[in-house]
Amino acid sequence: MSAAAPDITILTQGLSRSFGTVAAIRKVDMAILRGEIFGLVGPDGAGKTTIMRMLAGILTPDAGAISVDGIDVVRDAESVKHHVSYMPQRFGLYEDLTVTENLFFYGELFGVSRRDRLARSRELLAAAGLLPFQDRLASQLSGGMKQKLGLVCALIHAPRILLLDEPTTGVDPVSRRDFWAILYSLRESGVTIVLSTAYMDEAERCSRLALLHAGEIRHCDTPERLKQAMPGALLAVAGPDPRTLRTLIAGRPGVLGVLLMGDRVHVRVDDPARRIPELEALFAGQGITGAVISSADPGIEDVFVALVGTQTAS
Amino acid sequence: MFERLSVMLMKEFLELKRDRWAMFRLVVPLLVQMLVFGYAATFTVHHVTTAVLDLDQSQASRSLISHIVATSRFTVVDVAKTQRQITHDINDGSATIAIVIHAGFARELANGQGAPLQVIIDGTNSNTALIALGYLEQIVAQYSAQLPGTVTLVPGFAATPPRGIDLRTQPWFNAGLNDRWFFIPGVIGTLTLMQVVSLTAFAIVREREIGTLEQIMVSPIRPVEFILGKTLPFFLIGLGDISLISVLGILWFHIPFLGSPLIMLLGASLFLLASLGMGLLLSAFSRTQQQAFALNFFFVNPFFILSGFAFPIAAMPKALRWFTLINPLRYFLVVIRAIFLKGVGLSALWPDLLAMALLAFVMLTISVRRFHKSLD
């Protein structure tokens, strides 16, 4: 990779970090563009949080370089803190303070002027649906509301770069929708967003994804192109007992992968025209009725399994 | 700088105000412990349980016993008939001291040759034993002064007050040798140390646990702003504590306060800064509140024991004496006792004040240096 081009906001080169003898991340190279929503996808322990913390300047890499907005984060972590906002999985709120007081605290901490703070907090609280709860103690908020308040606090100083570590884990669907509405409007205004997620529907909404496994980036591209890169074609088998179906199908000739997806089984095959009749014959031979085979569009989960070889969640 | 510090302080005081048990936690244990210590921490020995075996049954022996029980120091719990009974009393703890007057006591006294008096004492609590024995020696000496012969204490313990040199003592600063005067100022320092160190250590570790510390690390706040914001409230709380329990000591326990309140304020401030530094250091080495608790327990008790609160530093082995040099409580106890009881000023106390200032400076500097804004 060459030196930072004008539109590259975050650039990492050869980023590595170990904890004791365990290598958390190995030689991670990323180039994240301004205004992107860049997704880190991978199972627990893949190194998502480690990367986030390094970008935020609170964890030093063992090796490698990080440049954020042209600032060398390894050498000068403090300068980056004015422009970056980092929201960990559980945002630290002061439970004995109200919504407004938490917001006031984080605003002052980042040196936001009074006028900006008042205007922005009103706008952000409205977007998060928190305006009616301004005087409520943080401890009295629901999990989803707490997480949205965390996001609002993280945005009070108008950061140019937003780092979100699994921001919607354990958040109700309504709050997630509010959350994403805010993220989209931020992208409109040119904020670069890096987020890690375990939700595949969220991964689909990112402009680009890095598939992370065991501390390494295995693939990095747009969701569309990752799907195209997936070898084979995807079939969905719906039936009364998906677990039995999965066992039956696995290892058959021409079957590249089998994945249980709720009440259906996703089957990746080399040649659908040839394999569909074979599978139907197999079901008939086993006396299985009511199993319906159709072709399916791959989701990120299918792509991840096909390209990386393991599931994101067990 | 000022905005960030003031918002930290505002946050701390808001949290304190919202915590409806805070005032209770900060004040009540302190007052209760002050009262308990004030009454219980004393070396004065009263009503020592005493068994008596009078094998002489003479006028002289009865007179000696009545001399002994006339003071409130000794209470006779058993008038024994046999030596076995005496042994039994001491073994089962019903008597701490046993006095045996052997047959022929009165005759030997009348002959002017001197009479032995056997004293058996339970040495389990060596301190109480020595003090009780001291009282007994005084009483016996007074008694024998009126007699032609001398009564001599024999083993168990034996001692005869020397004749010839007449020792006249005049204690200064605490004429009544009231050891409550000695202990109460010590209690004030000790309780304050315990309160402030643990408050500080726990407060920072708590922010780490609830995740707000990570949020603070990603902000542009400077370590010194954060640490000032976290510790200034405890400094003020500490000053409040010291004032409160000092007033309790003066008004309730009638401890004299002879020195200057200003020097007291100076000493207390330096002591509090050093205590805050200790708390910060403990928090720097703790990831969780359990670890902070363990470290707190590990350090605070030795600091208490090696402070001269009860056990004289001069009597400690050399290695421990060296260790006391880094103990802020050691210096503060000198200062607070001197201010309460002696009323001396800066000219006498400056070495201890300076030592506390140095300790405070070193510990606070290390804490600020050690507080990296990173998770490494």
Image (cartoon, coloured by chain):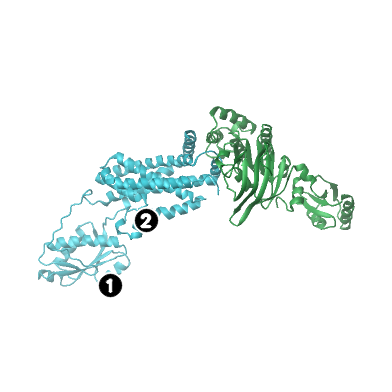
Chain colours: A green, B cyan
Q: Position of residue B301 (x, y in %)?
A: 40, 54
Foreground of the two, A255 or B175? A255
Whole-angstrom CA distance, mark 2 to mark 1, is 48 Å
User: Comparing marks 2 and 1, which lies closer to the viewer?
Assistant: 2
In this view of the protein, can residue B198 be seen by the observer? no
- Left or right of B329 on screen, residue A15: right
For this view, does B274 lie left or right of residue B45? right
Q: Nearer the viewer, residue B164 or A96?
A: B164
Query: Of the residues under marks 2 and 1, which one precedes in the sequence?
Result: 1
| Local secondary structure at mark 1 | helix
Disc 1: which residue = B84
Q: Which mark is residue A262?
A: none
Instruction: Kindly identify the amino acid type of the residue bearing the numbered disc 2.
Output: Phe
Image-quadrant location for residue B102: bottom left
Residue A82 or residue A241, whichever sits in front = A82
Is residue A160 visible in this depiction of the protein?
A: yes
Q: Is residue B337 above or below residue B4?
A: below
Q: Secondary structure at mark 2?
A: helix
Q: Which residue is mark 2?
A: B323
Q: Read off the chain for label 1.
A: B
Q: Is residue B97 left or right of residue A189?
A: left
The local crowd at label 1, few if under 14, some if 14 to 19, many if 20 or more residues have their Cα within 10 Å, is few
Give amino acid for label 1.
Arg
Going 32% across and 59% down the picture, which residue do you hit?
A: B316
Residue B96 screen position, x and y as percent: 28, 63
Q: Residue at x 83, y 54 (%)?
A: A255
